[in-house]
Image: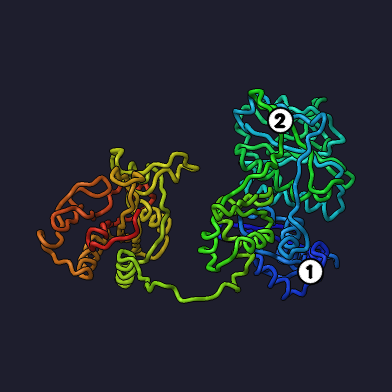
Amino acid sequence: PRVHSSSDKMPTVTVVRHELMKALGQEFTDKEFEDLCFEFGVELDDITTEGVMQRKEKGDKGAQVDSEKEEIVYKIDISANRYDLLCLEGMALALNVFRKKMDVPQFRSIKAATPQKMTVAPDTQKIRPFVVGCVLRGITFNSSRYNSFIELQDKLHENICRKRTLVAIGTHDLDTIEGPFSYEALPPEQIEFVPLNQTEKMNAVQVMELYEKDQKLKHYLHIIRNSPIYPVIYDAKRRVLSMPPIINGDHSKISLETKNVLIECTATDPMRAKIVLDTVVAMFSQYCTEPFTCEDLLVVGHDGKEEYFPDFKEHTISAKVDYINSICGVPLKPEEQIELLKKMQLNAVHEAASSTLKVTIPPTRHDILQACDVAEDVAIAYGYNNVPRKVPATNTYGKQLPLNKISDLLRGEIAQAGFTEILTFGLCSHAEAFAKLNRPDDGTTAVTLANPKTLDFEICRPCLLPGTLKTMGNGQKMPKPIRLFEITDVVLKCSDNDVGAMNRRHICAMHGGMSSGFEVVHGLLDHIMTMLDIKLDAKEGYSIVEAKDGAFFDGRCAKVLFKGDEVGIMGIVHPSTLEAFDIPFPCSALEIRLDTLTGATGPAK
């Protein structure tokens, strides 16, 4: 199985059809399996073959494909927080419990008489402070299980682990190493080992250089590269198990013959580390000598505190019977709700005195956080198609927010006036909003990001002018004149708002070409006011008065007033501003507030 995901799409798990049917213990037609997926709350997205997928990925190079690659595969869309469904084992387990073909497994962690121990050094707190782990005893791998085991780690790395920045998983053949283990942080020059699938010993600096061109690992090097110390895990004989989050050591690599597996997860987020460990253990402990069990790992923290992992201690969530029924829209008895929850791997008991269900959450269901999640699972198990349709008790109708409606109408009018609409980033650099516009920062205007990832996105834009100027500079090779406009929100500090900031709708328009086109933007202002039925009147309408602004020429700059209050500014853009944005021709710009002009309101911000 493989997984694909993106920020705007649900994760998609790819499983081989015949392996899934074998795990389910029943042959389904494609239509029957699609219906089963729908009932369970996932979606069969596509039915294809490994060969077709390979040809799509490689183009002509994939034209010749082995006949084995032609076996049918299912691509299944799952919820992003269902980490237990990221592999064939998890999908089969969930569907078998859902179909009542097996009971909810009871996962157990066993404390050995002499447990494996991991000691954490104090310096790890400076780079990657947490580690958890366990041992899978007597596990039996075959080719399919082994591949699924490796691929699940890759999927978790891309998903909840956030490309290894939050959690990194390491798996090792326990029979090739000796405990107790130590988790340390050392200068890279002092860490020497043979990386996974390599033959030569090298230090950590050389390891980083080796993987600079590796198509997979090069994306993770930045996580620790600039640190003076790197995390590393040793066994009792000072053999390196792994240098998280980059690479494992070759000495402890697992194979099809591996029988005892040490799993370690290093992390910057302890909760995610526990979720990842629980998921891997829950999926593959079924292949152990004693199914659904694992052996605890004793972790001795940097402060001497001892803790055993994984923590399979049961925790419960309470949900009122009436609340569940109100969410589902079906009058179910407590006994019926309990039976439905069993289909979703959740055991529950009914407390009659309070008419409440106490729901036990297994290590496979970290997505269950509160009562509404329990109600959702009851609804899924009951079947959305089985919920009776009824007309709502209240009669309501929807409509567009006034501010958005007037914005859309003005977009049409300005576009018909010959301007091209643009859409710019909501974030910009501090220099673009102030220094490049020759405007001072008084500290009360711009909302600053606490931890910007790049200098291009340091603050929320306090005006639309920087984005419009950047667009003009990037499009300077277009035929002249260039006329651009944007209608959207800016963000400003506001002490009266509970979040300390507010959104405000602005209109920005710009003309650039062989001449500044000041008369064009002035004419656009008059046209906008005409469309808004605002007359040229200093007291009751709009007016313009001379002004000074660092972004514009002195004597060619004017404030726009509405009933005596300033609502915008326009003028010929100053040469220094044009130079700062790499614009080689004259421009004129207009920026006005829309909310004040129209009195229209938007959503609460």
Looking at the picture, tell me which residue is in the foreground, 487 or 19. Answer: 19
Secondary structure state at the residue bearing disc 1: strand
Residue at 73% x, 37% y: name it. Answer: 133
Figure quadrant of the N terminus: bottom right
One can see residue 41 in this view? no
Looking at the picture, tell me which residue is in the foreground, 54 or 495. Answer: 495
User: Residue 137 placed where, x, y %?
Assistant: 84, 41
> In the drawing, does residue 183 fall left or right of residue 579?
right
User: Residue 292 placed where, x, y %?
Assistant: 79, 48
Q: Circle 2: is it few (<14), some (14-19), or many (20+) Cα within 10 Å?
A: many
The residue that disc 2 covers is 299
The amino acid type, in three-letter code, at marker 2 is: Val
Residue at 34% x, 68% y: name it. Answer: 408
The amino acid type, in three-letter code, at marker 1 is: Ile
Q: Quadrant of residue 98?
A: bottom right
Distance of label 2 from label 1 (alpha carbons): 44 Å
Secondary structure state at the residue bearing disc 2: strand
Residue sticking out furthest to the front:
353
